[in-house]
Amino acid sequence: MVPKKSNNGHERARIMSRVSAGEFVGRAGALERIVKLSGDGEARGLLLLLAPSAGVSELLRQSYDTLFYAHTETVPVYFSLSRKEKSPSAVARRFLYSFLQQISAFRLRDPRLANAALTKTDLLDLSPPADYEWIERLLAIVESEKASDEQSLVRLCLSAPERAATRGVRSLVMIDAAQLIEASETEISLGAEFVRALTQSRLPFVLAGLRRQVLDLVHSTLGDFDGLERQHLDRLEDEEVGQLVDYVARRESVELSDSTRDLIVQQLDGSPLFINALVEAAREKQRPLTSFRNCQRLYVEEVMGGRIHRHFSSIMDELVPASDTRRLLIRLLYETSASDTRKSTVEVWRKRLDVTSEQLQRLLHGLHIHELANVNGSLVEMNGAPLVWHDYLRARYEWEVASEPRASVLAGMLTDLLKRAPQTMERHYRREAAAGLPDLLSRFDCQRVPASLLHFDRFSRHYKGLSVEEAAPLLDAETDLVRLPQIVSVANTTAFHPPVQMQLEEERSAIAHGFDAGSYLEASEVVWLTAEIDSKMEAGRGLAEMWHNRLTHLARTRSFERVRIWLVSAEGFTTEAVDFLNEQGAYSSSRRQLEFLTARLGEGEPNRAVNGVTDEFELAIPMGEETELIAAHTVEQIARRFNFQPDAINQIKTALIEACINAAEHSLSTDRKIYQRFRLESDRLVVTVSSRGLLVPESHLETGAHGRSNGNHQSENVNGRRGWGLKLIRTLMDEVEFERVDDGTRLRMTKYLRKS
């Protein structure tokens, strides 16, 4: 990325950007990706998919300035659509003139030209000599197409980047506010024309807009996303949003306190659009934002009639032009959002709004695109929308539908918001202090972890008071291990069962779906129900039992068949609570245990190494012709190096030979190879045998509670030598485990090192 200052050391002059490069916070990765597009050998398109009000314009403007000052051969072109423009031909012509103007500004190294108000004559007069001829020709063709059909004119204007490329002018076009492309009600799909022109130009480009609309637009136009990269722009991190609030307040000379800054971050959901609106309003009205009262009063005024109000109202006016229908829509939206479930049926909407099916679908699609409501089949849901949207609905409903006096609406909202502010901040602080169960669960991928990390009584008995350095080697030496499932989906508990949101906080509970041993079978499917208990001391039996019952009830409500309940309490659990949870087969952990578990999963499986180095060897042998003897010779050399006793070495060799024969007989592999992995750890040798398409009888996949063989030899009702061979392997090795993998099954055998 180029420096933020020019060669003479001064802050570079802004061209398209609204703030200095030093005040641009967040989106560093996205900015770097856009800049990199200009230098890529291949022409690739980048779709920037943003959440509503997440902010993308400044990112594109900063990218433009960065590329302009980089002086590469690729010309940056920034074009922003406007809600005011309804004519496709007017938009296309403005794109053409903007494109040519920015080409000239870049080629002449004159940033002042990029935003100057220029006529068509000015464009020609200021064109670089090398470009004058083709620019004049293109403008003449456009003028001749004026009387022709509108679609031809649109396509001609949008073809400018491709035409310029034939003249040696390579450009990177960045389209901002792509969600406004479809605002026109004409027969011409301007969005589709932009997508076709950009993708057919064989030039890099950026198309930025609301994530749902951009994906729909590109898919409906092209049918797929081949050759296109996608980058999601979600809400900025709280720390970044806080920096943004500070920058805007300094820029607008608005006094701010730490507490009001944090409130603004949370209440406005980190939206740059709403943050700028609120702070600019504070400057205009000369109000310091140093107290919750000032902050909330100004916020209510913005929601009722300021910039925030105009933002949502412009969307509503666009979706529903008829005022009577719009009033009915406000009522329906507010009543749905205020209901317990925040849901309503599409049929109810059709009857209440009295519109045609086509009008209703267009309306619901618009709400869905702007994420003001979620349309799922026959249901319309109001979950997940930001607080600002719900506050706007309340204000409009009470004032326009319920006909409450403006003063009454303002007073009611202000008092409620002042009561809500401490609760908003409390939720934020509790979120910050949460253990991060959803993230931790998402890392589960069949790792083996010490059982004491999931049983508080064991951890307390052996590790209480020990430092991380003291406890780590003891945990490494544990032989009682728990095999974690492979988690494939994690969600907040309330997403599965909204009625429990009064009991289970989103940040402190999660439901994780997965499979034991990574085996994608119905019998292996498992659901982990987790919750973090709020207790300043060790949680007692009553609290543990209450939370266990809640999660058990939730499992029954959702018809989860195999579940694992895991409760976490900061200081752990009392003896009585642990006894109860152990009886129920539930796991129990303290924050300390979670720290150890997080560290282990963050690094992959614990690295139990010999003198700090883990040795791992791989070998592939063809099936048949007694090639298993090669594997036996290899493992013998490895075991000798690790100082296994002669008897143990013979046992390992025999087990490996049997495993190779077993793999050869059961495999459906086309390459007819057997793969072995030998891993030396501090106190054991782990041998893994696999082949592609390896099929093993279901009975051999049965394992005990901790992922080891359950020793149920009755389940090995296999005829012939193979049944005897598998029994022999279990006799020879300390741990034997079959595990499912995507392309078959794999056998893992462990032998512990016992010093003489």
Image (spheres, helix red, strand yellow):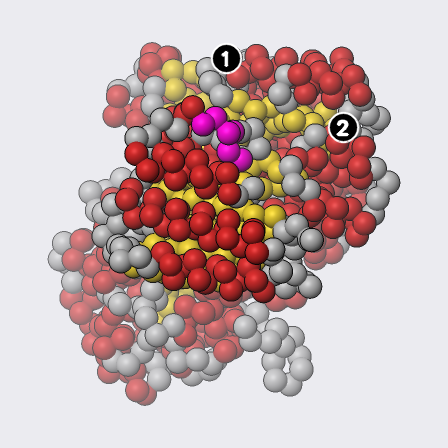
Identify the mark at residue 634; answer none if there is no mark: none
Residue at the image point whose x is 71% and y is 16% from the top: 580
Q: Position of residue 317 (x, y in %)?
A: 42, 32
Query: Which mark is on residue 457?
Result: 2
Question: From the viewer's perspective, is residue 663 above or below residue 302?
Answer: below
The structure residue drawn at horizontal position 32% and vertical position 59%, both measured from the top left corner, is 627
Question: Is residue 88 something that shows in the picture?
Answer: no
**On screen, 401 above or below 521?**
above
Q: Which amino acid type is shown beneath numbered disc 1?
A: Thr
Answer with the quarter of the image where residue 320 lies. top left
User: Residue 214 placed where, x, y %?
Assistant: 36, 46
Camera-side residue: 13 or 682?
682
* Residue 690 located left or right of residue 409: left
**Viewer-nearest residue: 112 or 274:** 274
Q: Position of residue 250 (x, y in %)?
A: 74, 56
Q: Is residue 735 left or right of residue 180?
A: right
Which residue carries the number 1 mark?
557
Q: Amino acid at mark 2?
A: Asp
Regarding mark 2 in the picture, which secondary structure is present there? helix
Query: Residue 213 location in percent, x, y?
Result: 36, 42
The boundaries of the magenta stretch are 708-713
